[in-house]
Amino acid sequence: MTDQGQINEENLTRLVGLFYGRVRADPDLGPIFNDAIADWPEHLAHLTDFWHSVMLTSGRFKGRPMMKHLMHRARIRPEHFDRWLALWAEATNEIMTPEAAAALQFKARQIGESFKLGLFYRPEDDDPALR
């Protein structure tokens, strides 16, 4: 039996399902995600593997998430990450213990910052000599 609200297979599966259900219904994020994902059950399983690998260092996830996001860069805006993180915080707070929710939220912020840098940062924006 698993501990309620801890980071484990059962709770990560519940979390990913709840969270992406909200993402799909969100007026800003939903259209982007729904247009990009053809097979939601398969994608949710893949995302569960991702979070399992990130939080439990299981190595189950095999993929290149940055490349997938780069394919949709024209539709993604920096503010979408803020909305994504807000929905993530709601879902993690609802399902997980406070400690587990905080750990998941911390990791999501790190991942989000990495994705924003990969998608939007251009050195020439900071250095006039590079323009």
Image (cartoon, helix red, strand yellow):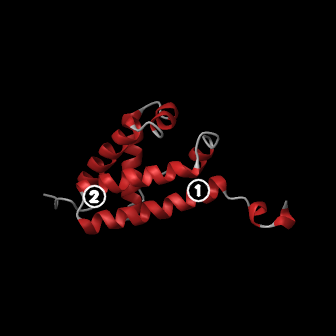
The residue identified by callout 1 is: 116
The residue identified by callout 2 is: 93
How far is the residue under mark 2 from the one under mark 1?
A: 24 Å
Residue 43 at x, y percent in the picture: 42, 40
Residue 6 at x, y percent in the picture: 23, 62
Q: What amino acid does circle 1 point to? A: Lys
Q: Give the structural element (helix, strand or loop) at label 2.
A: helix
* Front-lying residue, 86 or 104: 86
Q: What amino acid does circle 2 point to? A: Asn
Relative vertical location of residue 67 with respect to residue 8 in this rendering, above or below: above
Residue 112 at x, y percent in the picture: 51, 58
Relative vertical location of residue 81 with respect to residue 98 in this rendering, above or below: above
Does residue 113 appear in this view? yes
Q: Which residue is drawn at 47% across and 30% down?
A: 38
Q: In the rendering, which numbered label is found on residue 91? A: none
Of the numbered discs 2 and 1, the one sitting upstream in the chain is 2
Q: Which residue is drawn at 58% across and 47% down?
A: 77
Residue 42 at x, y percent in the picture: 40, 37
Does residue 61 appear in this view? no
Q: Residues within 10 Å of mark 2 (few under 14, many from 20)?
A: some
Q: Give the structural element (helix, strand or loop) at label 1.
A: helix
Q: Quadrant of the C terminus?
A: bottom right
Q: Do the residues labelled 2 and 1 touch (CB within 8 Å)?
A: no
Q: Residue at x 63, y 52 (%)?
A: 119
Q: Quadrant of residue 23?
A: top left
Q: In which quarter of the image is the N terminus?
A: bottom left
* Front-lying residue, 71 or 73: 73
Q: Residues within 10 Å of mark 1 (few under 14, many from 20)?
A: some
